[in-house]
Amino acid sequence: MQMPVKHMALGGLKARRDAGKARRWVWKAFTSSARRDGTQFYHWVRADAEFADYPFTRFNKRADVIR
């Protein structure tokens, strides 16, 4: 005897995925406060996103090297 299989109703995950409006992305320049040379980089971000500093700067850690 087999267990009955439940099928997902149409409109489950697909309906949620297609419900939102497409967002606009732009190719934007940024600098990181973790770098001292002021180099400018570029990456894709949403048009409505604003950052005071590059978000991944917090992962930059400097180690004191003992000689």
Image: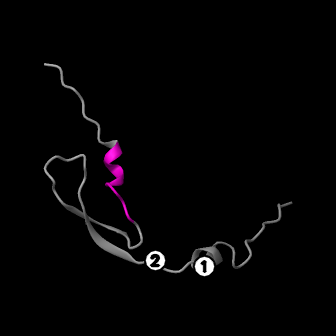
**Classed neighbour count for the residue bearing mark 1: other residues with Cα under 10 Å, few (<14), some (14–19), many (≥20):** few
Q: Position of residue 41 (x, y in %)?
A: 21, 61
Outermost residue, right direction? 1
Q: CA distance from mark 1 to mark 2?
A: 12 Å
In the rendering, which numbered label is found on residue 19? 1
Kindly indicate the quadrant of the structure image that contains residue 24. Answer: bottom left
Instruction: Specify the quadrant that holds the N terminus.
Output: bottom right
Q: Position of residue 21 (x, y in %)?
A: 53, 80
**Residue 63 vertical placement versus 7 (above, below):** above
SS class, disc 2: loop
Find the magenta span and give its range: 50-58
Question: Which residue is found at the position 40% from the left and 67% from the top?
Answer: 49
Colouring convention used in this rendered image of the protein: one colour
Q: Is residue 58 left or right of residue 22?
A: left
Q: Amino acid at mark 2?
A: Arg
**Residue 41 vertical placement versus 37 (above, below):** below
Q: Amino acid at mark 1?
A: Ala
Question: Which residue is found at the position 24% from the left and 30% from the top?
Answer: 63
Instruction: Specify the quadrant that holds the C terminus.
Output: top left
- Name the mark nearer the viewer: 1 or 2: 2
Q: Is residue 7 left or right of residue 54?
A: right
Q: Is residue 28 left or right of residue 23?
A: left
Q: Which sits in the foreground, 16 or 2?
A: 16
Question: Which residue is found at the position 17% from the left and 20% from the top?
Answer: 66
**Residue 58 vertical placement versus 55 (above, below):** above
Residue 21 covered by magenta stretch: no
Question: Which residue is found at the position 25% from the left and 52% from the top?
Answer: 32
Number of marks in the image? 2
- Mark 2 — residue? 23
SS class, disc 1: helix
Outermost residue, top direction? 67
